[in-house]
Image (tube, grey):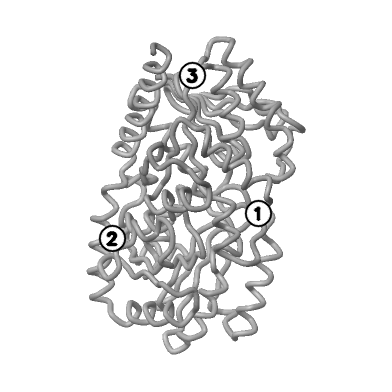
């Protein structure tokens, strides 16, 4: 097949940890790379953010990144980029007309899906939507979240028009049905993947030395895009209850527009007497993350909402137990009491309790680590890509059958 991946508001090559670069970027890049490896022709369409960057760039055999002009050739916030979606869809249509007509279009996030819908219609191809996050769910997860109503209204329209809705967890089916009135018969749940060759156990002591972690001091790790929805405030407050253990919290991610929140969290740590216990590392290249996971005793994901929670799976692939909120996709990746713990309450006390259990029990950590590594095997990209390709085959066949009828 020729597959069009539409990643409008952020390039899959963007450095991780910033305001608009996170798990979705990894997903689009790695899924596309694996689909190309399996013999498909893949074009990843993204909005041009640099006037000097080439329009097309071969990332691997069969995999091409296509940067198209839509609005100014500069990085834009999602809200500022939204008005140029029609211009971007038209540019994709012109590019495809020159000889790259897709068999299927896969739109990512509501903006990529909005552009992908128009592109797919013009190309006569089926449209698969993956929202990654849902505006209505974000607003309900935190009172302070204020995703615009225009986004939610457009998500509802896209859920109704798509040939298929791909989710990273079955729990999202419930949310789409409840808040968006989506048809469950057109939903498919396929988790995100992980590169188990890159994300694997490493020498713990060597990794700790590389990161400057002294002796046997317990190390906790948080990885993600720094935003309030990720619950880092909960984690800092939990850390305050672990003073006897004197753990170090390594927070990876958060450059690119998150300076105000980082300053707020640093002040929170100082006020709790934890300035020496919390280290904000900023953005870290994806290929360097295994060192951080391997150096940590526990990876913590205290999110208010996660459609999947890629960091948890990467940590498990590295043999690092996870303590996570019992929300969204984390429910389907972390097995409570086997490879980590799931916390049903969004408050620091239960997080502190489970973190203390793991910090004080190296044998339990080792058991969880072995289970974590085994459980990550089902997220290998080769298997995930085959399942996604089978979904594409299904919508292409259904579209063809409808055309014949």
Residue count near mark 1 (Cα–Cα under 10 Å), binned few <14, some 14–19, many ≥20: some
Question: Who is closer to the viewer here, 104 or 179?
Answer: 179
**Where does the image place residue 153, in percent across and percent down from the top left?**
63, 44
Q: CA distance from mark 1 to mark 2?
A: 34 Å
Vertical position of residue 284 compared to residue 61: above or below: below
**In this view, 35 is above or below 147:** above
The quarter of the picture where the N terminus appears is top left
Q: Which mark is residue 147?
A: 1
Report the residue marked by disc 3: 102
Q: Up-down: is 402 above or below 315? A: above
Query: What is the crowding at mark 2: few (fewer than 14 residues within 10 Å), some, or many (at least 20)?
Result: many
Q: Residue at x 31, y 43 (%)?
A: 380
Report helix, strand or loop for mark 1.
loop
Could you tell me residue 135's position as x and y percent? 59, 52
Residue 310 seen in this snapshot: no
Q: Quadrant of residue 390?
A: top left
Q: Is residue 30 visible?
A: yes
Q: Which residue is mark 2?
A: 372
**Relative to residue 295, is residue 148 drawn left or right?**
right
Counting from the top left corner in percent of width and height, residue 29 is at 47, 37
Give the Cα distance between marks 3 and 2: 38 Å
For the residues labelled 3 and 1, the Cα–Cα distance comes to 32 Å
Q: Nearer the viewer, mark 1 or mark 2?
A: 1
Element at badge 3? loop
Residue nearest the observer in this picture, 322 or 170: 170
Which badge, 3 or 1, comes first in the chain's sequence?
A: 3
Tell me whether circle 3 and circle 1 mark residues in contact (CB < 8 Å).
Answer: no
């Amino acid at each position: 097949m020729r597959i069009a991946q539409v990643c409008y508001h952020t390039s899959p090559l963007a450095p991780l940890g910033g305001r608009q670069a996170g798990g979705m970027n990894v997903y689009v890049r790695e899924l596309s790379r694996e689909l190309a490896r399996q013999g498909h022709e893949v074009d990843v369409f993204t909005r041009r953010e640099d006037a000097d960057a080439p329009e097309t760039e071969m990332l691997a055999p069969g995999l091409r990144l296509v940067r198209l002009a839509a609005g100014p050739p500069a990085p834009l916030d999602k809200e500022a980029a939204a008005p140029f979606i029609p211009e971007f869809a038209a540019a994709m249509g012109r590019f495809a007309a020159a000889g790259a007509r897709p068999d299927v279009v896969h739109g990512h996030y509501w903006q990529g899906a909005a552009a992908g819908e128009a592109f797919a219609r013009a190309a006569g191809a089926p449209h698969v939507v993956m929202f990654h996050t849902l505006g209505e769910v974000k607003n309900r997860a935190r009172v302070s979240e204020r995703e615009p109503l225009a986004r939610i209204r457009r998500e509802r329209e896209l859920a109704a028009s798509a040939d298929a809705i791909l989710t990273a967890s079955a729990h999202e089916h419930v949310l789409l049905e409840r808040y968006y009135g989506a048809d469950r018969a057109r939903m498919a749940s396929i988790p995100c993947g992980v590169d188990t060759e890159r994300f694997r156990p490493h020498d713990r002591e060597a990794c700790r030395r590389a990161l400057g972690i002294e002796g046997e001091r317990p190390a906790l790790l948080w990885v993600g895009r720094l935003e309030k929805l990720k619950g880092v405030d909960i984690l800092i407050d939990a850390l305050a209850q672990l003073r006897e253990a004197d753990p170090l919290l390594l927070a990876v991610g958060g450059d690119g527009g998150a300076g105000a929140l980082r300053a707020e969290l640093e002040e929170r740590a100082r006020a709790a007497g934890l300035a020496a216990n919390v280290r904000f590392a900023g953005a870290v290249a994806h290929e360097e993350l295994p060192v951080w996971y391997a150096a940590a005793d526990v990876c913590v994901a205290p999110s208010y909402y996660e459609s999947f929670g890629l960091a948890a799976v990467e940590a498990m692939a590295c043999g690092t137990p996870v303590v996570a909120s019992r929300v969204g996709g984390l429910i389907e990746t972390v097995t409570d009491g086997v490879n980590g713990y799931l916390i049903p309450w969004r408050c620091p006390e239960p997080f502190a309790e489970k973190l203390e259990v793991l910090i004080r029990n190296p044998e339990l950590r080792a058991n969880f680590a072995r289970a974590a590594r085994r459980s990550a095997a089902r997220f290998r990209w080769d298997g995930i890509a085959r399942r996604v390709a089978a979904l594409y085959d299904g919508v292409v066949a259904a579209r063809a059958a409808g055309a014949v009828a």
